[in-house]
Image (spheres, rainbow, N blue to C red):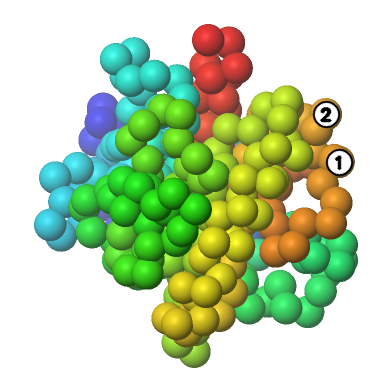
Amino acid sequence: ERLCSGMTPDQQADTRDYILLEYKTDKDRALARFPLAEMFIDQEGSVPPCVAWTLFAEPPEGCRTSPIHDFFSNSLSVSAYRQLELCGASFDRFKAQYQLPMLPKGIPIIFPDGNHNFPYHEWFYNLTLPVLASGIVDESSIIQGENFCMEGPQPGKIYHPSAQNHRHIDRALVAQHPEGQKCLVLYQDKVSHQLRQAMASLGAAAALAESWMKVTGIKSVLCVAQVLDCQTSHQVDRFAYPLIILSEHNGSLLRFYRGTFVGAVQYQRVRHITV
């Protein structure tokens, strides 16, 4: 707050808008549009977390807290496993609040045929999240036994299990394409030495959702796995659904969160690994 108190209102506005546009495009285009942000970014185009914390302090309508405040928060009373999941969920809320793309362009998507550059990837890059409600709904409301509850995930909600030993997924939500189609997004946030097992769980959740997707008209499913052990990211083969692997090893974690936000995720990853 002290750093931001020395910023003029125009500098604050430019820096705030720079962060949003940089996520959608890149550093050069964002800085050309909002040049007053230059004093507050490093050579990689990242803004100090304390500045982002202050500039995005306003919570969405109907919510008590800012998604970015929740994203940067770290409580020792919350388990390392849960904290990493909450970090990812808070970033989804932030993207929904400011209508940022669900995925930054250039993030590698692995398609079932193993082709990273299948033309269909542009459809995923155009997905956004509907404005999310403040509540987080337990996973058990959508996965019951071996069935996917026919009410299913609804746009505007994050489905996030409260039990530590939850099955299949860490969270789920529905993203939307500008043309009206919807996509079910399934996350595993903390994959360490059992990537194949995590992929099997993601695939099982996606398979359970298929009949529900046909009824609701959801076009596709996208699976996202955050890999903590960089040596495991090459082990994926024959996965039946579009897949993103977030790893520091292949640079995708930085692409997904950008420099302004990736440090908080890296800290939570280290805390998770070392507990």
Residue at 86% x, 41% y is 234
Q: Pick the residue in front: 73 or 116.
A: 116
Q: What's the residue type where badge 1 is placed?
A: His
User: Outermost residue toward the bottom?
Assistant: 179
The quadrant the N terminus occupies is top left
Give the answer, above or below, for where 175 lies relative to 235: below
Residue at 52% x, 74% y is 211
Q: Is residue 111 left or right of residue 157?
A: right
Residue 158 at x, y percent in the picture = 35, 54
Residue at 39% x, 36% y is 86
Residue 115 at x, y percent in the picture = 87, 66
Q: Is residue 179 left or right of residue 11?
A: right
Q: Is residue 236 left or right of residue 163?
A: right
Q: Secondary structure at mark 2?
A: helix
Q: What's the residue type where badge 2 is placed?
A: Gln
Residue at 49% x, 53% y is 146
Q: Pick the residue in front: 217 or 68.
A: 217
Residue 173 at x, y percent in the picture = 42, 60
Displayed quadrant of residue 113: bottom right
Residue 111 at x, y percent in the picture = 78, 65
Displayed quadrant of residue 129: bottom left
Q: Is residue 271 left or right of residue 227?
A: left
User: Outermost residue toward the top?
Assistant: 275
Q: Which residue is mark 2?
A: 231
The answer to whether mark 2 and mark 1 are in CB contact below 8 A is: yes
Q: Which residue is mark 1?
A: 234
Distance from the alpha carbon under mark 2 to that under mark 1: 7 Å
Badge 2: residue crowd in 10 Å (few <14, some 14–19, many ≥20)? few
